[in-house]
Each structure stands twice: as C-alpha cells, then as structure tokens.
Image: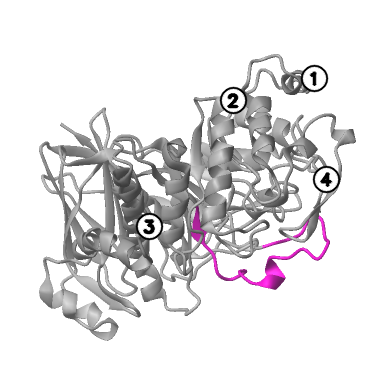
Amino acid sequence: MLSNGDLYSVAQSERSRIVNHWCGGCNTTARRRKASSNYAQVVTKAKFHLHRRHHVGPVDPRIFGGFLEHMGRAVYEGIYDPTSAHADSYGCRADVLSALDELDFTVMRYPGGNFVSNYHWRDGVGPVEARPVRRDLAWGTTEPNTFGTNEFLSLCERTGWSPMFAVNLGTGSPEEAADWVEYTNSDLKTDIAKQRDGDQIQQLSKVPLWCLGNEMDGPWQIGHMPAADYGVRARQTAHMMKLVDPSIELVVSGSSLPDNSSYMEWDREALDAVGGLADYLSTHRYLDNYSGDTSAFLCSGVLIDQQIAEIDSVCRYVAGKRRSNRRPFIAFDEWNVWYRTRNRDHMWANGKFPAHLVEEIYDLQDALVCAQFLMSFIRNADVVKIANIAQVVNVIAPVLTKGDALLRQTIFEALAMFVSRREGNSLRLGYEGPTIESGVFEGVAALDGAAIISDDNQLHVYAINRSVDSSFDLEIDFSGGQVAAASAEILHHSSPTAQNTWDNPDAVRRSEVEVSAQEIPIVQLPPNSFLAVTFKVT
C-alpha cells in the first residue's frame, strides 16, 4: 500500500515545478527578499511571456459551474420563494435568476453537500402537497421538500444549466442511487418511469454527471466511513448506475480537506476501488484570512496549484497502476473563500426554517482570491475539468437576498469578468518580475496570471496584483502573432477590505480600462487589483 509519504513524493516534482514557476524563479534576489517593509522599493515592472502554440489544453466550460445545496436560504428564500414580489410562475425569484444569468454558470451541482447524505430523492418528487416534511440532520433544520428533483430539472431547462447530482451514500443505498438515474434518464417503461411520466418531467434534460456521495472522508458527514468501506459501496453504486445509463459520468468522493490526516491516501484507496468506473475525482478547498494578513491571504492562491498537482498525482498513479490509458480527471466541485461564518453558531439552524446560515459578506481581497481559484483552474486545464463555486445565492455566495432586495457581492464582480473571456485553449504563461514573501509564503509571484487563446483568435489575459502597496506596469509579450484592439476591465479599490453592503451596494465595481495599442502592450495594475483583458490576434 502506498503511504501518504510516498504519495507526497510522487507529487513533489510537479509541486516544485509549480512553485519555481510562480515564485518568480527569474529573479533570485527578489525571491530571497524578506518582505513587506522593503517591498515598495522593488522595481514595479513585470512581464508575462506567452506563445500562441504553447497550449496547456482546452478550457472545459464546466469549470465555471455553481453549487446549489439545501442549506440555509440557498433554495428557500434564495432561488425559490413563491411569496416574493419577484416570484415567477414557477415560484422562483426572477431577480436572482437574472443576476445568476450574468455569471452564466454552465453546470449546477445539487442537492448537496452534507445535506445529501441524509436525503432520499423520492421525498422530493410527486405531488408537492403529498411530499413529506423531514428533519435535516446536516444543518439542523427541516426540509419541506417543496423544491426537489422536478423543480430543479425544470429550473435547469430554463437557465441552461447542466445538472450535476450527488447521490446519498451516507444513509442511502446503491439501489436507491440507480433508481434515481432511472427516474431522470431512462426511457424504459418501468414503474419508476411511469412515476416520472405522472410527474410530467419526461421532457426535461437528463442528468449527465453524478457524484458518488459527498465528503465521505469527513467525520462530520452523516454515514462517514473508512476509505475501504466507501470504495466498496461507491463501486457497487457506480456499477448499478452505469447499468441503468452507461453514458453518465461519475465523480468519486475525494478528500474534503487537505489538512485531513488521510489526505491523498483516501483519494488513492477510493479511486483504486472504483477503478475504471470512475471518470473524475472530487476535491474541495476553502481559503481563509483568519489571521487578518491581507498580504499572505493574497498569496494563498498558490495553494490551489499545489492541491491540483497533488490530486493529479493520485489520479495518474492509479491509472498507471491499472495500466490504463483512461485516467480520471479532477472535479474541484466545492471551492470558495469562507471564514467569517465558519463556526457552529453560523452552521446550525437550531430548528429554524429557513435559517440564515453562513451568509458571508465579502470584501475586495476575497474577490481577488476567488479570481485566483479560476485562474488556477485555467492554468491546469489539462487536468481540471469541472469546478463548482459553493454556493450561488445567500450561502457563502456572490448574490444575497433580503426580503425582495438583492445584493451583488464583490466576488460577483470578479466572477463576471470571466464570462466573456473563457473559451479556448489555456496557454502556458511565463512570469518575469518581483516576488512577495508574506507569512508562510516565500517567493510568490507578485502578479498572478492566466491566459486563453480562442479559436477566433482572441487572446484573453488575466492578472492579479497581489501587492498591497505597489503598482505594476505589466508588459504582455505575445509571440506567434500580433495583438491589436484590446478591451479590458479592472476590479480595484484603494482598500482591500472594501465591501458591497446593503447601505453601499456599489462600493466595489469592475470598470473598463484602456490598454495601450503597441507591439508589446503595457497595462498598469494598482495594488489590490484584478485585470481581465482581451486582444484581437492577427
């Protein structure tokens, strides 16, 4: 059996490559400089080196996915609120859906999360008035099941989201999971299909993507079990589900936290057990700023590259062990910034319904770190194929509701800057410039970057200034073509802790910015800023 230490060794060379690349290896003096008070004295010039043929891989549109869990006010008083003045004919909030439409989510994970490990899908189908009210053991509230499979699939039809379901492997069974696939995807005239026809969902989209449980490695999870036990159950479940519909893709539940003692070993054992039935391996991450150190927080995006390299090493190892050229890829199906409301009082409803749980108010620095997640997924487009921000409304979300009012948070602004700049091939990006050392982070590139070249010859470049006190003139050196006519947006505020609030909803907004039309374009990034720019390539 491969130990944790062995797995870390497998990942070591790839981690070193990433750290050396994003720690500004071209500038030894800057790399060794001990930070902050001297940082403002470094040369405020930097350069991105790009070549149109140096592809990482096509950017999978599913990395721009969302997550809707039956938690707090995500569903009830979030997506679904028939009592709202904004309610449409389906009982959903038109203002919320309009805001989410601006973010153009591609895939939507449902119904959990921790919630799914005690959820039985049959409670959420059939006549609404006949559905049972259940105790939700995950979040300490009640679940009326007014909104379930039918309502969610109908919503996906109207929004264009591709549904991604998680099955209950906590208190559920493989048979129950296979029956759910039968209900949503099968054309056979079975008793389950007859129930579906009676529920009038026969015209709704089938569900192409299924998660085999959620965070089954976590002791907080209902039905938590050792990796060996999970592997047996997940394989049995996968086998039955694919017998119902061989076309579906399956996500194995991986490590919920990199800090878990079983990290990587759990992933290896679970993935090994599911074998060739596994299409993806799940991994989760929430970054935080408990320390209040903005400089260190803005450097923490490097941890995402490291985690991807580690999980990818597991995927490659298991495929290699099986002598298989069909490898599982990564589904980063929970990610976000989360720390202000991450405690028992904010995560437990005490019987209330709907309860105000983990309704984080985000600031600019949170938005910059959220952008770094997506930039990391783009940089690692060859291995990361699915990603879901947790979540989309009210619960650690870009959108908040209060009564009939709606608030777009700072992270909404960052996510919106990717919407029109995300199709094409990810490009390898070389960084030349100063570095930052702050907290536990040493030699981190002062500018984080990512780039995409589209089929219609558009070059999309992303850049984040991680410095809290220095501006940068960024040169974008593009080889293999000439760039012209740029359009750009920037997200910036003089204070990294600036927030959009109910009293001041427009404090932090993205704005258009001009980019010089010259052979090597130069853009200026003030401290605490995120730039997204698109060039036409000739």
- Residue 397 at what x, y percent from top left? 58, 54
Tag 3: amino acid = Gln
Number of marks present in the image shown? 4
Name the quadrant of the N terminus: bottom left
The 10 Å Cα crowd at callout 1, few under 14, some 14 to 19, many 20 or more, is few
N-terminal-most mark, 1 or 4:
4
Marks 2/4: CA–CA distance: 29 Å
Badge 4 marks a residue whose secondary structure is: loop
N-terminal-most mark, 1 or 2:
1
Marks 1/2: CA–CA distance: 20 Å
Identify the residue under disc 4.
144
N-terminal-most mark, 1 or 3:
1
Q: Nearer the viewer, residue 165 or 252?
A: 252
Marks 3/4: CA–CA distance: 37 Å
- CB of mark 1 within 8 Å of CB of mark 4? no
Numbered mark located on residue 198 in the image: 1
> Does 495 appear in magenta?
no
In this rendering, is residue 88 above or below 114? above
Identify the residue under disc 3.
372
Please report the bounds of the magenta region as a residue range.
Answer: 334-357
Badge 1 marks a residue whose secondary structure is: helix
